[in-house]
Amino acid sequence: MQLKRKDILGLQDMTAEEIGLILDTAESYKEILSRPVKKVPILRGKSICTLFYENSTRTRCSFELAAKIMSADTTSVSVSGSSIQKGESFKDTLLTLEAMGMDLFVIRHSASGAPHFAARVVKSGVVNAGDGMHEHPTQGLLDMLTIRENKGRIEGLKVLIVGDIMHSRVARSNLWGLSKMGAEVRICGPATLLPVGVDKLPVKTYTDLDEAIDGVDVVNVLRIQLERMDRGFFPSIREYSKFYGVSKTRLKRAKPDVLVMHPGPMNRGIEITPEVADGEFAVITDQVTNGVAVRMALLYLLLGGGGSVVSA
Amino acid sequence: MSVTRVMDEEEIRRALIRIAHEIIERNKGAQNLVVIGVQSRGVPMAKRLAKLISEIEGVEVPMGSLNVALYRDDFATRSARTISASDIPFDVTNKTVILVDEVLFTGRTTRAALDAIMDLGRPAVIQLAVLVDRGHRELPIRADYVGKNLPTSKKERVDVHWVETKGEDAVMIAK
């Protein structure tokens, strides 16, 4: 099977088969990451541009590293230090970079739907690296790869996503992806941090964490996004931590072999206690490693079919 | 389409036994040997050769399988196939690597396999064993061990069936 699309914009519009193909491909690339020479020649001559309108450490590094391992060339553009600060529009920025011969854009933007707009503007492929409060598909995929690797499957598992669901694109990509792959998805957070229209999502909704965590196979802890909290969504950090912080005691209610995940960056002591973050159930660094493998797989599958022949 | 059977189970068995002996003779034993099959078609043959050499010499010969998809030169013109990771559970550095594939044709897969192995380490020697050499090379590559030389036209197709995957051992030419 082949991935017959130009762009990866979100998991909501992808099929279970497509997600399965990406996860299988990513799994097979993990071996490359453990080699002494982490380099394969397959994407020689391809140019990949990371265009980030928001800050990022792990996503940007992960994409760039994935591209470099596959021998593609990367160019990174951020708002500060570029002509975006002189007022160049998003569209003109894209067209300028495309005219230089970019084969693929990796875009992060604070506006939901910005990568979708970009995908219509440019002929090159677009990968959404996080758009506003909408989706972060590669994070969803790497979370699913981590779950599948540790549990051997996704179907039939109970996965709890806890925290600031409303502002979280990670939560959205996870719940769409996981439900397509046959998992039971639960979301839990204070009522003020649950999105509008939650009843239309393929999830079970909870406001009591002790009830939500009961018997789950996976707990995915979200970061409290203090930078998006312009008004009081909860009375105090301390109160949030007391009711929604994932602690060792709370974790006892989950399955004995529960996985604890966090997309990072962590607020230790707020949404997750340090002993859980560093504890035996945490697979947080595995997630980061899997992120590189998932992005390698996506670059391969998107830049694969058609296009110019890479000469021997 | 007409199909001609050019090797049967017995002929394949004898060819593999002969190749196993040739490998041992050329390398003066099997102490430093490792066998690597090119995925997916070269793997059943690599398994059998490793087993035969182990039986004849009484030493365990390590066997691995190699995915060359990321090293191909025709990646953009073929569809990405279902992929399984390379499985090489040993270090190739300073080893005598017996690279195994079923059919040697243009030599492009072998070129990709050589590059893939070089990225894993620095073998002392790489030798190539194939069941069928059908000619029409596009690169300066030759096999060290050949089961059968089979003159073909470029339009014909050579299919190797293995018990493991197709339920029988046979080599066919389809035209």
Image (cartoon, helix red, strand yellow):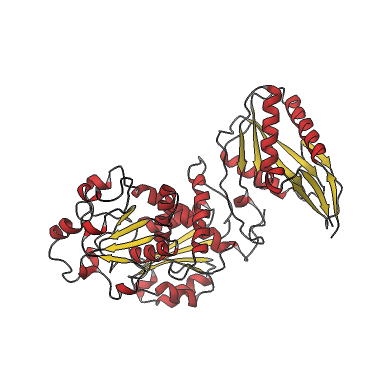
The one nearer the camera, A94 or B53, is: B53
- As drawn, A27 above or below A171: above
- Image check: A195 left or right of B27? left
Q: Position of residue B53 (x, y in %)?
A: 70, 28
Quarter occupied by residue A207: bottom left
Q: Say if residue A27 shows up in the picture.
A: yes
Quarter occupied by residue A5: bottom right
Looking at the rendered image, the quarter that the C terminus of chain B falls into is: bottom right
- Image check: A197 left or right of A234? right
Q: Residue at x 82, y 47 (%)?
A: B134
The one nearer the camera, A259 or B61, is: A259
- As drawn, B140 above or below A125: above
Q: Residue at x 16, y 66 (%)?
A: A234
Q: Position of residue B114 (x, y in %)?
A: 66, 42
The one nearer the camera, A106 or B17, is: B17
Q: Position of residue A60 (x, y in %)?
A: 40, 58
Looking at the rendered image, the quarter that the N terminus of chain B falls into is: bottom right
Q: Residue at x 18, y 69 (%)?
A: A233
- Image check: B42 left or right of A193? right
